[in-house]
Image: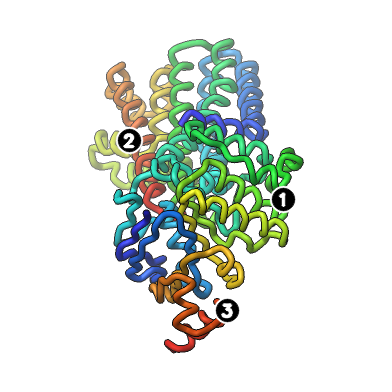
């Protein structure tokens, strides 16, 4: 498997997109840290940008990479290799190199300018979000053979999780504001990895006040270390569910 | 060596293979013929595990190969249209497959030499002509001295000299006791290399006979006429 992973990495690194992505993140983070003065503020702005761009770039890059590697995978399935291994190598190759870019691009500036527990959470969240959206991209790619359709599904997923979902949550909160919604909101958050990541980082910044009463609520429920562990556990579940289901589809389809 | 039992496969509503049962022994060159879309390629891909059958079983040496993968070290496959990562060079593709198949005891580089692939090692796969890609496919299929070769229209894009080289190689490997499955539309070629012919029509096995017996019972000298006679008879 390591051999296949080696060739996947090789292919991705020659492709300049990951390098450009690293530079983009690096410029963004250094810029934000130098703008604000207060590292907490910079991390907050960085968080919002990261939660918008990382899912988008991960999902689009992973989907196009998957379709472009079709020939490579076709070549390998005629060899004595388990299909699941091929799939896992592709996944680790893409998710690994994108997370590497993220760690370099965001991790280094955070370490230099604002090393803190919050910074660490931001990094972990970014890595998880990368793995989650690459898994979703692979799911979109194995569902359909048509590249355009696959990218379409991937973009829709991004739209849903990054933009539409928040609208739906706000709508529900507003409509049912007469009822006690504490647990319902909590459950709603767990259903969106982007929100989950946002809350993990926000709760460790002293800005819960900015989030109004829900913020206070989350702080009381999610503020402890134990609940951070729970939140990361949920993120891990968000990685595993799309990954395992796409691997299952991939190993049972015709090539 | 290969036994196929009641193999069925459909792509959506289209039934490609309908209850195909057939078996092939070692040391034989078997030619799979049939009209376009009769399921020849699908059958080959089922043996390779690239296409997963809906029902039925495929056994190699008595062992079912469904959902297995290690058995593929015994198979060399040459696809009809070889598709390769476009930005890899010939050398990189060959090296990669070798790297993956490091445990293979013998590496047969005869075709690489005969086709002069070494001189083109630095060319990108995406820049190659269809025929050159076919040569790479052929070299890869024979490279690890497999016991079974599945060649899907091997000479379709090759120039006459390269096709001749391939035919010689096929006959040479046959003498080593290998089973070679060839799908082809060129009857003269089938006649040259094959011992047996199996014919698929609409996903069903029409006949499976040796070339000699086909010629004998149709009273024809040439295989193409004999096959045409059988096809017309049954209509």
Marking on residue B128 = 1
* Residue B150, image x, y percentages: 50, 55
Looking at the rendered image, the disc whose residue lies closer to the viewer, 2 or 1, is 1
Marking on residue A190 = 2
Classify residue B60 as left or right of residue B87: left
**For mark 3, what is the residue?**
B222
> Please, is residue B71 above or below residue A197 in the view?
below
Tell which subunit mark 1 falls on. B
Q: Earlier in the sequence, mark 3 or mark 1?
A: 1
Looking at the rendered image, the disc whose residue lies closer to the viewer, 3 or 1, is 3
Residue drawn at x 45%, y 72% is: B199
Classify residue B45 as left or right of residue A103: left
Residue A170 appears anywhere in the view:
no
Labels 3, 1: one chain:
yes
Q: Disc 3 to disc 2, how far (Cα)?
A: 72 Å
Dot 3 lies on which element? loop
Describe the colour scheme in one phrase. rainbow
Residue drawn at x 34%, y 58% is: B3
Structural crowding at the residue carrying mark 1, measured as other residues with C-alpha within 10 Å and reported as few (<14), some (14–19) or many (≥20): some
Q: Disc 2 to disc 1, how far (Cα)?
A: 51 Å
* Residue A189, image x, y percentages: 34, 36
Labels 2, 1: one chain:
no
**Front-lying residue, A177 or A135:** A135
Identity of the residue furthest to the right in this view:
B119
* Residue A107, image x, y percentages: 54, 18
Tell which subunit mark 2 falls on. A
Mark 2 and mark 1 residues within 8 Å of each other at the beta carbon: no
Structural crowding at the residue carrying mark 3, measured as other residues with C-alpha within 10 Å and reported as few (<14), some (14–19) or many (≥20): some
Structural crowding at the residue carrying mark 2, measured as other residues with C-alpha within 10 Å and reported as few (<14), some (14–19) or many (≥20): some
């Amino acid at each position: 498997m390591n051999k296949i992973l080696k060739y996947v990495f090789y292919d991705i690194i020659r492709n300049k997109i990951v390098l450009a992505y690293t530079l983009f993140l690096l410029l963004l983070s250094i810029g934000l840290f130098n703008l604000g003065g207060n590292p907490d503020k910079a991390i907050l702005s960085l968080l919002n940008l990261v939660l918008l761009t990382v899912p988008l770039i991960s999902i689009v890059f992973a989907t196009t990479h998957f379709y472009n590697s079709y020939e490579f995978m076709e070549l390998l399935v005629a060899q004595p290799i388990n299909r699941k291994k091929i799939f896992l190598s592709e996944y680790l190759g893409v998710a690994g190199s994108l997370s590497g870019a993220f760690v370099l691009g965001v991790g280094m500036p955070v370490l230099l300018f604002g090393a803190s527990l919050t910074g660490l959470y931001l990094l972990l969240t970014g890595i998880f979000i990368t793995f989650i959206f690459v898994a979703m991209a692979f799911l979109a790619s194995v569902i359909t053979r048509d590249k355009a359709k696959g990218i379409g599904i991937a973009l829709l997923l991004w739209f849903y999780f990054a933009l539409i979902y928040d609208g739906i949550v706000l709508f529900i909160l507003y409509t049912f504001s007469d009822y006690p919604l504490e647990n319902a909101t909590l459950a709603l958050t767990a259903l969106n990895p982007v929100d989950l990541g946002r809350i993990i980082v926000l709760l460790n910044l002293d800005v819960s006040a900015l989030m109004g009463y829900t913020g206070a609520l989350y702080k009381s429920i999610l503020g402890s270390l134990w609940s951070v562990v729970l939140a990361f556990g949920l993120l891990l579940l968000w990685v595993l569910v799309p990954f395992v289901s796409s691997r299952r589809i991939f190993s049972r389809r015709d090539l | 060596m290969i036994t196929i039992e009641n193999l069925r496969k459909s792509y959506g509503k289209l039934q490609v293979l309908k209850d195909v049962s057939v078996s092939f022994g070692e040391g034989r060159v078997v030619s799979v013929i049939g009209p376009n879309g009769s399921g020849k390629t699908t059958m080959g891909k089922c043996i390779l595990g690239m296409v997963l059958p809906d029902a039925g079983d495929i056994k190699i040496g008595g062992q079912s190969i469904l959902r297995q993968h290690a058995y593929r070290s015994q198979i060399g496959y040459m696809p009809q249209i070889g598709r390769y990562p476009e930005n890899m060079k010939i050398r990189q593709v060959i090296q990669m497959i070798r790297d993956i198949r490091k445990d293979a005891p013998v590496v047969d580089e005869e075709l690489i030499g005969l086709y002069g692939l070494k001189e083109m090692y630095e060319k990108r796969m995406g820049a190659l002509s269809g025929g050159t890609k076919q040569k790479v496919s052929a070299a890869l299929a024979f490279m690890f001295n497999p016991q079974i070769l599945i060649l899907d229209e091997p000479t379709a894009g090759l120039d006459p000299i390269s096709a001749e080289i391939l035919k010689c190689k096929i006959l040479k490997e046959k003498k080593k006791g290998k089973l070679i499955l060839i799908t082809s539309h060129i009857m003269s070629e089938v006649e040259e290399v094959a011992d047996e012919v199996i014919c698929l029509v609409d996903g069903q096995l029409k006949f499976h006979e040796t070339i000699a017996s086909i010629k004998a019972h149709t009273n024809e000298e040439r295989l193409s006429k004999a096959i045409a006679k059988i096809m017309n008879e049954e209509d």
